[in-house]
Amino acid sequence: MNTSSKIAVLGMVALSFAFSGKVTAQTMKEKTVMVGGAPMYPSKNIIENAVNSKDHKTLVAAVKAAGLVETLQGAGPFTVLAPTDAAFAKLPKGTVETLVKPENKEMLTKILTYHVLAGKYSAKDIWAAVKAGNGKSMMKTVEGEGLTFWTKGKDLYVQDAKGNSAKVTIADVNQSNGVIHVIDTVLMP
């Protein structure tokens, strides 16, 4: 095959990629993380990604019940500590069902915003803050109270105001308006 033929073939391959569709291009250039069996796209916002995770159905329902969908679709940036369905299942029986009732919207909003930090904090940022704080770092939530982060071995943990601890099980799930860190326990203000 001569040089002209090689260039023509390369050009056709390049054109086929260019016209193969947005999804293929998006998949090829975005570094996705799998959460709950679904790819999380950095070009999508927190809500657009979270609704696809099989592990976050309870969290998504709670965010809807609290009226926080629009907020978490906003520009942010936000750092969301996202409890899994299994984390919500650890709560006393009936807790979730009670919290999502309209008359408990204020308490639900308080709990959910306790899982959000204003700004985008990667796991590396949090590790650096823990190191600078001699093993612990307190960070203020959107709800207003603080969470304490610390590390153990290669794992990152967070402790709530009541002394409950959650482990970050999937870190750095980047979003267009922030980052999600999946946690294994619901935090309580």
Image: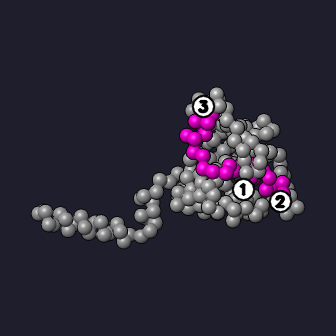
Identify the amino acid type marked 3: Lys
On residue 105, the disc is: 2
Indicate which disc, 3 or 2, sits on the residue closer to the N terminus. 2
Residue 115 higher or lower than 138, as above or below = below
Residue that sits furthest to the front in the current view: 132
Magenta stretch: includes residue 120:
yes
Range of the magenta residues? Answer: 105-132
* Residue at the image position 70 percent from the left and 38 percent from the top: 138
| Residue that carries the numbered disc 3 in the rendered image | 131
Callout 2: helix, strand or loop? helix
Identify the amino acid type marked 2: Lys
Q: CA distance from mark 3 to mark 2?
A: 37 Å
Residue that sits furthest to the right in the current view: 103
Q: Is residue 89 visible?
A: no
Q: Is residue 92 visible?
A: yes
User: Between residues 113 and 35, which one lies in front from this camera angle?
Assistant: 113
| Residue that carries the numbered disc 1 in the rendered image | 58
Colour pattern of the rendering: one colour
Residue 28: image quadrant is bottom left
* Residue at the image position 68 percent from the left and 49 percent from the top: 117
